[in-house]
Amino acid sequence: MQLKNDLLLRAARGEKVERTPVWLMRQAGRILPEYREVRASVSGFIELAKTPALAAEVTLQPVDILGVDAAIIFSDILVIPEAMGLPYEMVEKRGPYFPKTIASIEEVKKLRIASPEEDLNYVLEAIKITKKELDGRVPLIGFAGCPWTIFCYMIEGSGSKTFSKARKMLYREPEMARVLLDKITQSTIDYLKAQIAAGADIVQIFDSWAGILPPEQYNTFSLSYIQQICDAIDEVPVTVFAKGAFFARSEMAKLNCETIGLDWNMKIGESRQMIGEDKTLQGNLDPCALYGSSKEVASATRNMLDQFGNSRHIANLGHGVYPDIDPKMVKVFVETVKDYSTKLRA
Amino acid sequence: MQLKNDLLLRAARGEKVERTPVWLMRQAGRILPEYREVRASVSGFIELAKTPALAAEVTLQPVDILGVDAAIIFSDILVIPEAMGLPYEMVEKRGPYFPKTIASIEEVKKLRIASPEEDLNYVLEAIKITKKELDGRVPLIGFAGCPWTIFCYMIEGSGSKTFSKARKMLYREPEMARVLLDKITQSTIDYLKAQIAAGADIVQIFDSWAGILPPEQYNTFSLSYIQQICDAIDEVPVTVFAKGAFFARSEMAKLNCETIGLDWNMKIGESRQMIGEDKTLQGNLDPCALYGSSKEVASATRNMLDQFGNSRHIANLGHGVYPDIDPKMVKVFVETVKDYSTKLRA
């Protein structure tokens, strides 16, 4: 089906756009009262993500309510470890928790390569329903976690300040780490390809814990696997968002992907210089800037757009939108991008 | 008293050294069984920090056991909010917790400027005992938190993944934030000067949460206060360690301090280039590298030393040593620095 608004895809590919496309990480979620209503009708986050009709419903909400230029399928990066044989729970106010974690090569060998059709069909179904309901209004973004980030959760079993258990394995059992990372990578490639077959128009991979590795280890244990994924996906544009990987920006420029996400710590001009003109950059307003007044949000947004100038850009925050942000301020952000970037690109 | 080993001070001042001095952040702490024994004799961390004889005892342990070139007074950055009127608890496995936090300008106004002699005499006593017991063997490092990091705890009441409450205040109540930061800064200057008067030979300020601010806000709400502290201390060398502030390295070069700490994410050559030759750099081995074998620890340490070369350098990890690291590996780190840097600087 022909998309009515394909700004995001054109911006990703570096084609001419009449204005800068805009969406927000975590736009489908707790900021919207409409989301909280759907969420209250089920037992928890995981049930919501596993019920395709409801996952599709909350995926569509920000398109209708906030006017963003893309939908992103409502799901979680941790569906991959679950599909490989490590189920998880979502503990209220604490985050994800894996009752079983990986500590030996035997446990790594027992893990299966995730089969998207068997293990993750609920995501594919949600994508199909969403695509139908979207009716071509905006593109749909599919996503997955980066192997390194997924690895962290599989070893630690939950979030961590230092991820020192996962990092210990890189020093003590590098071969075992590689076997596990390979399995996650293969699962992720198959999963992203299945999302694309189901209808995803673009995919993003999230390296949430990129920032805890020293630069050399990041190249070895994260970037090389991201590269395998980028090389395997040629059906749609790929976005890589590695939070905190400021030290890897020059290396990321060489990835076979269209777009690189910037977090709010990364200076825009410096990042453009390190990454070059051949990638689209996505981001990177401080998520906390949306705590300001309408006037301040609009001004901070214009300031960000000025810094990206007329270059390849997809507007977003530098991180997921925080749950207590007023949706009105998200609208100010979205509207400011639309209006101001139209002038900027005229 | 004349120091028998003043390598750290000479390295900080950029004077000639026959080898690179070495110490570790959190060297006085849970890694040592001798520390855990003392710790078990009291009710908790805070009681230990507030008992000068015991604080001095654990401060001295790593000098004797690990052979480091400096002692750092056993204390906590959160004694400052407590001395200003906000007491805290240390919750086992969760970290610090403030029952009362700051949410209004009235609460800010009620806070007092900490009086080191009245409110923090236990730290000054611990410093005096330590200096006596050290008998000039190595220098003693005093320390404090950076105003921005202390501010975060005073607003949030505990650690946080996003510190979005503290950051919200910068957008919503910037004037109130400035009043609070001024009060913390004044308290910190007085406190560091009292530590120096009590015997500290060098002081370090820790900006643990530097990495969560966008670059411009970091300059406004953190670096400008660090600068006030650096400008106020001229009695001894000053070290600034701003974890995650990769984006501020060029700006930090202009601080009126002798040494800048690097975390393990920061590339050494790049940092030297950004900061220039006029500062000593401190750091920055990945704390997880000490999980490796003796051979691997020695090799990683030599590799780090090679990268710093013959420039102004104080060897350390890029973060505090993790509590489950084998003290034997810390010794390998320390010994390797001593041996290898002697050759490197010959």
Image: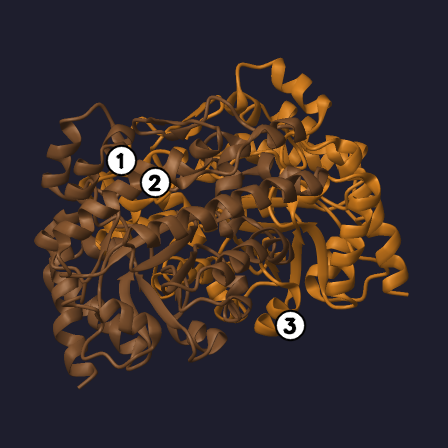
Chain colours: A orange, B brown
Secondary structure beneath disc 1?
helix
Q: Is residue B1 above or below residue A144?
A: below
In the rendered image, which residue does mark 3 sit on? A278
Residue at 46%, 62% (x, y): give it. A227
| Amino acid identity at mark 1 | Ala
Q: Are marks 2 and 3 on the same chain?
A: no
Residue at 15%, 51% (x, y): give it. B132
Q: Are marks 1 and 3 on the same chain?
A: no
Q: Is residue A271 above or below residue A204?
A: below
In the rendered image, which residue does mark 2 sit on? B76
Give percent across and percent down for residue A50. 53, 25
Q: Is residue A82 above or below residue B23?
A: above
Determine which quarter of the picture holds residue A213.
bottom left
**Front residue of this view, candidates A256 and B185:** B185
In the rendered image, which residue does mark 1 sit on? B49
**Front residue of this view, candidates A341 and B336:** B336
| Amino acid identity at mark 3 | Asp
Q: Is residue B291 left or right of residue A310?
A: left
Q: Which mark is residue A78?
A: none
Residue B296 visible, this angle: no
Q: Chain of mark 2?
A: B
Pick whichever of labels 1 and 2 is earlier in the sequence: 1
Residue A78 visible, this angle: yes
Asked if marks 2 and 3 touch (Cβ < 8 Å), the reply is no
